[in-house]
Amino acid sequence: MSTTTAEATREGERWDRSSPVSDVFNEGQAHLGYWYGPDDGTPMAEASRRLTRKVVDVLGVRADQHVLDAGCGPGGPALLVAEETGARVTGVTVSRFEAEAGAGKAAARGLSDRVRFEHGDYARLGHHADGSFDAVMAMESLQYAPDLPGALAELFRVLRPGGALTMTDYTLAPGVPPRERDALAEQLALPHLQPVEAWLDALRETGFAVEEYTQCGPRVFGMGPKYVEAAEHGRDRIGAAFGPEAVSGLKEAMGRFFATGGERIAYSVVTVRRPRAAGEGPGTGRE
């Protein structure tokens, strides 16, 4: 087993432990929510779907496309894409729990013919041919890639020429001194915490062409109290599944995590495209 494979296995085991709670807490979604402001009363699960829809919109997903959800969590985003666009979706996750949970949801919704979940590493997709996917979404998953350049290269390979990739992730807020980066990365367990410009450089070095990016930290990470409130509102549901101590633990963990605030931790939505080689014609996706 290579070092990277061993790290991916450990990462999968970590999500196996934490994802069952987030699956219940946030209705099959393992990413943050998007609110328009402190007075926006949208429930957390719907705010998370709002963020997924922003990704779907910027990718321009259509029914004739095949989408890769790289680091798919317990399946919520992949199912939303399939239900609301008609596209086929393949979700890949290092967590066995997440793959099985996603497959169960797809079967329950009658979507197994269009949505499939793989227990594997999105940095090792050798069973998928070059250019297999029309679009790639990576929601808060690249942050945890043991080998980020290798993961980006693999996603570039399986994306068809002309296809787009949209990632959402934590980024270092503008103006935060570089000397604070390592301390924040360790404190928040965000190994690739860096300014959005560093993400853009990494994507360009892989061969992607940057199309657009949005920094929306105040509306995502900066809404810390809403995550703690959501845990309290879900007390009965979470407690019934995992015991009352799980609710207290979740609230405490979220309080610590979001205490850093949107002034230091930003959140970015970045869209890039795999350029066509000279002579290549248009593909199936929106250009």
Image: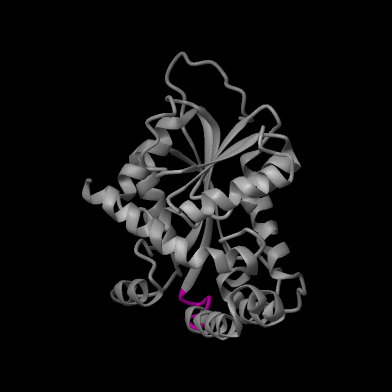
Q: Quadrant of the C terminus?
A: top right
Residue 244 placed where, x, y %? 61, 84
Camera sees residue 224: yes
Residue 87 horizontal side relative to residue 251, left or right: right
Q: Does residue 55 appear in the picture of this structure?
A: no
> In this rendering, would 82 be left or right of 176?
right
Compared with residue 130, is residue 208 higher up or lower down, i.e. above or below?
A: below
* 213 is higher (above) or lower (below) than 249: above
Give x and y (percent) for residue 59.
61, 41
Q: In percent of the image, x 69 and y 69: which residue is there?
A: 44
Position of residue 50 measured from the top left corner of the image (x, y, whole percent): 70, 58
Q: Residue at x 47, y 52 (%)?
A: 96
Q: Residue furthest left?
A: 2
Residue pictured at 74% horizontal, 45% vertical: 109
- Residue found at x 57% / y 69%: 21
Of residue 182 and residue 131, the one placed in the foreground of this image is 131
In the picture shown, does residue 197 fall above or below 187? above
Decide which of 110, 226 is in the foreground and name it: 110
Q: Is residue 117 magenta?
A: no
| Extreme residue in the top direction | 279
Marker count (numbered): 0
In the rendered image, residue 25, in percent from the top left (x then y), is placed at 64, 69
Left or right: residue 97 versus residue 29 is left
Magenta stretch: dominant secondary structure: loop
Colour setup of the view = one colour
- Residue numbers of the magenta segment: 259-264
